[in-house]
Amino acid sequence: MAAGQTNSRTLLMKIFESWHDENIPDCSPDTAFEIFASELALRSYGLGLENIQDGIVGSGQDGGIDSIFTFWDDNLLDEDSEIFSDSKKPSEFSQERLLELWVLQAKRSPSFEEVALDKLENTLRRVLDLNQDMDGLKGLYNESLLARIDLFRKSWEKLLVRRPKISVRIVYATPGDRQGVSPQVLIKQNLLQQAVADLLPPGATVDCSLSGDRELLARYNEKPTYSLPMRFQENATSGNSHVALVTLSDYFNLIADENRKLRRHLFDWNVRDYQGPVTVNQEIRRTLENEQSPEFWWLNNGVTIICSEATTGGKTYSLTDIQIVNGLQTSHTIYEALRDHPNADIGDRMILVRIISTTDRKTRDQVIRATNRQTPVNEASLRATDEIQRNIEDYFLVNGWYYDRRKNFYKNEGKDPAKIIGIPLLGQALTAMGLCRPDKARGKPSSLLKNDDDYTSVFNSGVNLSVFLWAARTQRTVDVFLHSESASATQAQRNNLKFHLAMLVAVELVGKRIYRPQQLEIVASENAELGESFLADRLDLLKEFTTSFVGGGNTTLEKAAKNQQFTQYILAQLGV
């Protein structure tokens, strides 16, 4: 039954239309709403638009699922995450960490329907059954869906001996009114939740939620808070810098929200990920829990906060634009200790907090590098502070684009999302176009910047800055085209061929095979417009090559896209 129009729905759809025009104008409204709803559902994870688009699986044979995402210990998993490395043993990963699967269905129709929940139940019964061979499902579901589900299944199986905390979150989103949902829909919602719970081990959690116009609107209006108060016991000030002794309870209140959830966005600029119960973190935990140990701040280096402004009133700091750039391991360990035992005496212990108030980018980078030299840090983690990275950011700025060296920096400033490019995507684009290695760009989205040779092959002073901007613009143009209706691309082609199409564009413009990014300087200086017909011709050619390569049935598009043999086949067909 058609639902009446509400103010919430009117506002939500106007917001969606504006978001659609600003972010992915050539994308169909239905696919755009899937991306929009997924971004809202996962907003607390701070994912970029490219991350969301990679998770979209809705197309033919999608089993009623529009997007799928897997998180391990709050980190989004992709194909080359360390968890899937053959060289990594299960014992090297933390015990009892959270393994989350997010499954989303989004429809623009202003109502919740039973059939959508029926489809979700039938699909999840099959794909989450570990006794069901994934190859046996190829005739039922599309390649993208099976690949994304396989990330969860493989991580679950590998981490089984580490006793992961399994959580499955199912979101059915429409611009409808959740208050007016029929009893039949509510029954189907509960049946779906129970069906999934029956497939999971004891202790696993399953949440199946209906997100309507009010819920989606509320999600849109949620903004991460970067300006917060912090109580202290003692402090000292010198110019724009401060040191303070803060009780662990007060520090917990800074890094956790009102629901006792970690404010992950405060650590966006930290060079490390949380390492779990490694030796140093176990020692921190033991120090916290040992009543006989000396003062905590005597034994711990504390944390470093960078902010744009720090003012005091009484025994409270007011901190603006907070980023905690050193002390992630300590912060997480404190968070877990007090989250698990909120009334413990350890909350009265104190931590040393350094506060540096500056808006100068170079100073911030110097602080980050210096404070992270106290213990070993992989050089790849410090890439964002490299001079070449600052130079690229400056060049982008004077040309009206934004280079997100620091995760979500320009997104949080409200800059045009269509002109924001992060380090990982730029590295992938240069690898695909400047090295003719789209297979590596597709197959190693996380590890490209961790290997020194891979990093310096694209990010070095010998590459003219105009090449970086050209590559960013070109890759973004290719991505937008692939999501347009005129491309007639399947979701599997959008997910797997965007870097291969970018390579074909670059090779055509240069007129020969490309071995070094410097070869792109000529086309970058010309900055030729990439017309729709030009891109369509290259895509038609790529589709022909793809059909020929995978036509024998010995491989899939997903696997071929990550295989250098496919790249070599394409180049051979091009005669370069």
Image: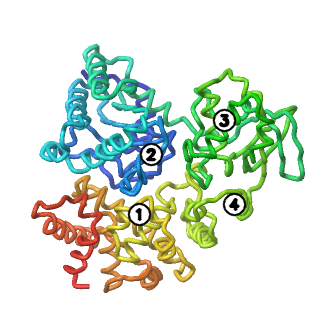
**In the rendered image, which residue does mark 2 sit on?**
91
Q: Are marks 1 and 4 in contact (CB under 8 Å)?
A: no
- Which numbered disc, 2 or 1, marks the residue that appears first in the sequence? 2
Q: Are marks 2 and 1 in contact (CB under 8 Å)?
A: no
Q: Are marks 3 and 4 in contact (CB under 8 Å)?
A: no
Q: Which mark is residue 373?
A: 4
Q: Are marks 3 and 2 in contact (CB under 8 Å)?
A: no
- Which numbered disc, 2 or 4, marks the residue that appears first in the sequence? 2
Percent coordinates x, y for residue 542 in the rendering: 22, 69
Q: Using the rendered image of the protein, determine whether residue 376 is visible from the camera's viewpoint.
A: yes
Percent coordinates x, y for residue 479 in the rendering: 36, 61
Classed neighbour count for the residue bearing mark 1: other residues with Cα under 10 Å, few (<14), some (14–19), many (≥20) = many
- Which numbered disc, 3 or 1, marks the residue that appears first in the sequence? 3
| Distance Cα–Cα, label 2 vs label 1 | 40 Å
The mark lying in front, picked from 2 and 1, is 2
Q: Quadrant of residue 475?
A: bottom left
Q: Using the rendered image of the protein, determine whether residue 486 is visible from the camera's viewpoint.
A: no
| Distance Cα–Cα, label 3 vs label 2 | 21 Å
Q: Which mark is residue 476?
A: 1
**In the rendered image, which residue does mark 3 sit on?**
286
Percent coordinates x, y for residue 121 in the rendering: 23, 28
Q: Quadrant of residue 17?
A: top left
Q: Which one is in front, 482 or 196?
A: 196
Kindly state the secondary structure of the residue where label 2 is placed.
Answer: helix
